[in-house]
């Protein structure tokens, strides 16, 4: 039996990097399910295929390219602006202000940044609904990533360079374990945010895998509680 490496701690962390969807709000809100449906509809309309075939293509591209958008761009010439505007036109009302999480984020020493495969517009709406926009210095989105989504290594390098982040003094919070592999390789402390087992979530099995991976230092189903514990 191979011993698991000792998890990295937060003693040297001065930059706190957060994914957006299913990380800064609970998985069980299933907000991303709305986006998922609009992605399927976009694929169906663009390729003129049935919803069932569109769903198959959507998930295939998601797994192979990191986002369905990337696959649609490379395989079918879709323009990112058209795609992002359509798929993010959702009802954000399930999100409610979360002052407790805001306080926990504000109390962290150093900078706070968002790194998302979504758009700045979508991130702005989410952060505004949660009431935590003012705690973050900047949002690095799919456009800033030159349309190359996580987990592409070059995306993390672009992010670190643009915002002057030292990965050895940074922590990354994510809901997909595969998106933590490169950050961990670069030296970041990694935290996987998983669903509350008592709530129903609409996710594929592979999206929920990886909590035991060597590149995951910490796992939590309660981000606010986790951040509060760090401060204690």
Image: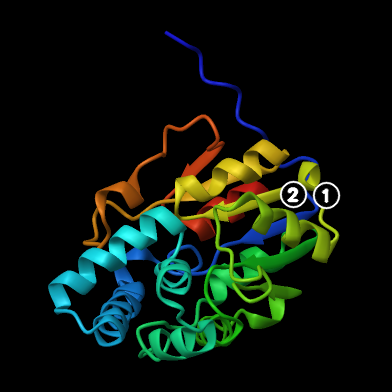
Badge 2 element: strand
Percent coordinates x, y for residue 92 in the rendering: 40, 87
The image position of residue 201, as x and y in percent, is: 25, 62
Q: Quadrant of the N terminus?
A: top left
Task: From this view, report whether residue 34 is shown above or below residue 58.
Answer: below
Task: Specify whether 220 is left or right of 188.
Answer: left
**Residue 187 badge:** none
Q: How many marks?
A: 2
Marks 1 and 2 close (CB-CB < 8 Å): yes
> What secondary structure is found at the residue carrying circle 1?
loop
Q: Taking 19 as reference, is 170 left or right? A: right
> What colouring does the structure picture have?
rainbow
| Residue 40 shown left or right of residue 4 in the figure | left
Q: Quadrant of residue 183?
A: top right
Residues packed near mark 1 inside 10 Å, few (<14), some (14 to 19) or many (20 plus): some
User: Who is closer to the viewer here, 169 or 198?
Assistant: 169
- Front residue of this view, candidates 98 and 122: 122
Which of 171/163 is in front?
A: 163
List the single residue furthest toward the right.
164
Q: Is residue 67 above or below residue 6?
A: below
At label 2, counting other C-alpha atoms closer than 10 Å, the crowd grade (few under 14, some 14-19, many 20 or more) is: many
Residue 69 seen by the camera: yes
Q: Residue 232: tell me if it is visible.
A: no
Q: Residue at x 13, y 72 (%)?
A: 52
**Which residue corresponds to the image point at 61% horizontal and 23% vertical from the top-left?**
6
Which quadrant holds residue 26? bottom left
Q: In the image, is 89 to the left or to the right of 109?
A: left
Per the image, the residue denoted by label 2 is: 170
The residue at which mark 1 appears reads as 166
Extreme-front residue of the structure: 76
Quadrant in the picture for residue 12: top right
């Amino acid at each position: 039996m191979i011993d698991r490496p000792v998890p990295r701690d937060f003693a040297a962390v001065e930059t706190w990097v957060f994914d957006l969807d299913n990380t800064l709000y609970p998985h069980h809100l299933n907000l991303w399910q709305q986006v998922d449906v609009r992605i399927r509809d976009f694929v169906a309309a663009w390729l003129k295929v049935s919803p069932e075939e569109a769903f198959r293509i959507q998930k295939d591209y998601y797994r192979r390219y990191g986002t369905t958008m990337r696959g649609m761009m490379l395989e079918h010439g879709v323009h990112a602006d058209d795609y992002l505007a359509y798929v993010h036109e959702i009802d954000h009302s399930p999100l409610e202000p979360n002052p407790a999480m805001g306080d926990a984020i504000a109390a962290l020493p150093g900078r706070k940044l968002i790194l998302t495969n979504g758009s700045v517009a979508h991130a702005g709406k989410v952060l505004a609904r949660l009431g935590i926009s003012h705690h973050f210095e900047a949002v690095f989105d799919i456009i800033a990533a030159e349309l190359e989504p996580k987990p592409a290594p070059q995306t993390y390098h672009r992010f670190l360079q643009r915002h002057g982040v030292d990965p050895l003094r940074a922590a990354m919070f994510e809901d997909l374990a595969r998106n933590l592999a490169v950050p961990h390789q670069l030296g970041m402390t990694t935290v996987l945010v998983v669903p509350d087992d008592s709530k129903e979530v609409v996710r594929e099995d592979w999206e929920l895998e990886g909590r035991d991976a060597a590149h995951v230092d910490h796992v939590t189903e309660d981000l606010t509680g986790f951040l509060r514990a760090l401060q204690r």
